[in-house]
Amino acid sequence: MSVPTTTNTGGKTRLTDIADQAGVSTATVSRVLNGKVGVASDTRQAVLAALDVLGYERPEKLRNRSAGLVGLVVPELSNPVFPAFAQTIEGLLSQRGYTPLLCTQSPGGTTEDEYIEMLQEHSVDGILFVAGLHADTRASHARYEQLRVQGTPLTFVNGFASGIEAPFISCDDHAAMELAVRHLVSLGHQRIGLAIGPSRFITAQRKIEGFKEALRSHLGQMSTDEHVATSLFTVEGGQAAANDLIDSGHTAIVCGSDLMALGAVRAAHQRRLSVPDDISVIGYDDSPLIGFTDPPLTTIRQPVSAMAHAAVSGLIAMIEGSPAPKSELLFHPELIVRNSTGTSPDARISAYQVVNG
């Protein structure tokens, strides 16, 4: 049984293929393709997604009519967590009938202010910012105040700025550092360092604060500045920070991003040190494919899907005239333990001495 839908190979769509991909019955697929009522929105979306994944064009009557335009401003896409946020948010906006206009930044490219101007020219219904200038404590917030005065609904992900009347969605960085340090202490580590990006960003500041609090709580270390190495949120930045921390005798390194963690692993390998036998490394984000590195990376997982749902729901509520919380919603992270963390070398030596007298 088939329907006359054009495929990317010129053939016809097989209902069984779509049903298998969507996890529904062929009868359900048929109802969706023929525009019948009585199909749950999630089920309908699964069938449409199956069409897209299998490379089929949607029938004309199934193509969405946009309810409006929404700007989505994200940083450069070299950090895999940002494309993950962008893809999830774009999908959620599309499900709600809105057309996302994706604006990605890169060094030397279009600035956030230039994107804002372009989005205003397109008369967008709202703008969602992911880790934008709102997260930079040195940046002016006048651009956002102007948008609010003009009545443009705004929502921000990762990075709180007091004084802006808008919903903020963030991962709890204090909780993340508590999870990381507690895990490493349980493995016997006493010299734990933090490799972090520029401290002008609120997310970096919160990680530093949470890290120092965890060191005081679990290890009783009151002097903590020596355990923090500041660099860039990049592989090269992580490598540089890790070199400093290894030189000062640290046996475990918590990183401000997965990219920094990859740099820390590189720094260890260049010194012919084993991860995790000599140095334990923890990342942050649980970016796509990070579990397939060598070794697979222990990391702090941001709940990207839940955060994206909250951000989109808040923005759409404002666009449609309903009130949205003008405060910050903190989402709890999760520690994902893989093979880049292990028992402290000092703890192994102590255990060996006990066993062998």
Image (cartoon, rainbow, N blue to C red):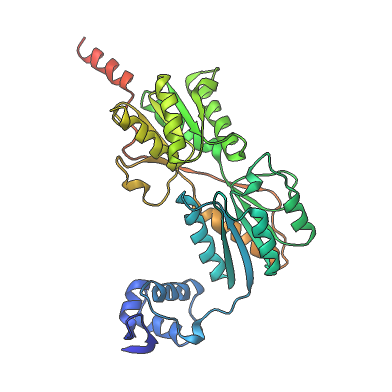
Q: x%, y% of residue 249?
A: 40, 19
Q: Is residue 36 visible?
A: no
The relative height of residue 14 versus residue 298 in the rendered view (above or below) is: below
Residue furthest to the left: 356
Q: Is residue 138 visible?
A: yes
Q: Nearer the viewer, residue 324 or 273?
A: 273
In front: 354, or 320?
A: 320
Q: Is residue 55 above or below residue 158?
A: below
Residue 245 in percent (x, y) is at: 43, 24
Look at 42% across and 46% down and name the residue there.
286
Where's residue 256, x and y in %? 49, 37
In this rendering, position of residue 55 left or right of residue 357? right
Asked whether, in this view, residue 29 is left or right of residue 117, the answer is left
Quarter residue 9 falls in: bottom left
Which residue is found at the position 55% from the left and 39% from the top?
173
Residue under the point 44% across and 31% down = 240
In the rendered image, the quadrant that contains the C terminus is top left
